[in-house]
Amino acid sequence: MTERPILEVSGLCVSYGRIEAVRGVDIHVGAGEFVGVIGSNGAGKTSTLRAISGVVKPAAGAVNFDSSDVTGQPSHRMVARGLAMVPEGRMVFSDQSVRDNLVLGAYTRIKTDPRGVDEDIEKTIAMFPRLGERIDQSAGTLSGGEQQMLAIARGLLSRPRLLVIDELSLGLAPKILDMLFPVLIDLNRKGLSILLVEQMASYALSVTHRTYVMENGRVLLEGKSSDLAHDERVLDAYLGRR
Ligand code: ATP
């Protein structure tokens, strides 16, 4: 990992009125790295991702993506630059078909590269065959797991270099997660950088290279995931050891 990180976040602060959700967070993701963020409810994980992906403007701090200062840039610009976000709760367009949802993910290039978009849709279907079987079905009729597959596939349609995922596991059965995580590992092995916020610490620590632990709007710990999985503080607070 000698290259400059694809994402560098420094001194990030996010406030909602008087609530300081994120208070001076430093995070980086190396090119080709798979990085996790864990922490309890309200720790500021989602707010951190929102500020990185341009959904909210940071109150302070800087976001550098692909060697450019992108602090405060709106999310559509971030997508065009190569950062795609898979939001918490999936946010698929329920009334639209699976195919239309995928095409919407490719809005940055649908006019200039329709053939490439079709090819990429075929690739995501190969990755998630269930989406292929339901390609003309409205997204609202999919199961939670299938909607999460669609949300990931939609993110990939913009051909990102960094995929930012908020709470992959939310409301999903272990069986589905055992299917989704290997897809992410495979995408990462093929070169995609991934930043994953995950409340199920055991999953996050087992798939990522490096993990940040957030509490009360700050980074409490940071290290190799394989080390943190054995860290006393992590075992006690996040891996349910009594
Ligand atoms: P969770 O896992 O529960 O989503 P989180 O670690 O992602 O938690 P955030 O969602 O970033 O944490 O929330 C951090 C703090 O900011 C919390 O105290 C939350 O109540 C507050 N917060 C988040 N979004 C808003 C908002 N839109 N308006 C006001 N307060 C907010």
Image (tube, helix red, strand yellow):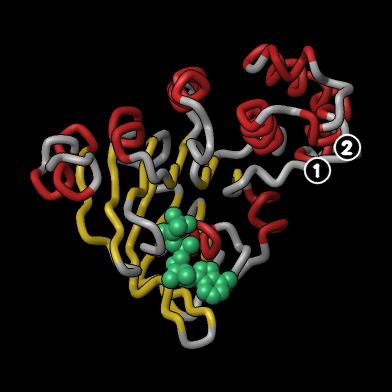
* Tag 1: amino acid: Phe
Kindly indicate the quadrant of the structure image that contains residue 142.
top right
Q: Is mark 2 within 8 Å of ligand 1?
A: no
Going 64% across and 50% down the picture, which residue do you hit? Answer: 81
Q: Residue 53, image x and y in percent?
A: 58, 57
**Residue that numbered label 2 is attached to:** 96
Looking at the image, residue 117 lies above or below residue 222: above
Q: Which mark is residue 74?
A: none
Q: Marks 2 and 1: in contact by CB < 8 Å?
A: yes
Looking at the image, residue 135 lies above or below residue 9: above
Q: Nearer the viewer, residue 182 or 199?
A: 199
Q: Is the residue marked by circle 2 packed among few (<14), some (14-19), or many (20+) residues within 10 Å?
A: some
- In space, the residues marked 1 and 2 are separated at their CA atoms by 6 Å
Q: Which quadrant is home to the N terminus?
A: top left
Mark 1 residue element: loop
In this view, the residue farthest toward the bottom is 18
Q: Which mark is residue 93?
A: 1
Q: Residue 135, image x and y in percent?
A: 83, 20
Going 70% across and 17% down the picture, which residue do you hit? Answer: 123
Q: Nearer the viewer, residue 29 or 96?
A: 96
Left or right placement of residue 197 versus residue 130 in this view: left
In this view, the residue farthest toward the left is 232
Can residue 64 be seen at all in this image of the molecule?
A: no
Going 78% across and 12% down the picture, which residue do you hit? Answer: 133
Q: Residue 193, image x and y in percent?
A: 46, 37
Can residue 114 be seen at all in this image of the molecule?
A: yes
* Tag 2: amino acid: Gln
Q: Which quadrant is home to the C terminus?
A: top left
Going 68% across and 28% down the picture, which residue do you hit? Answer: 143
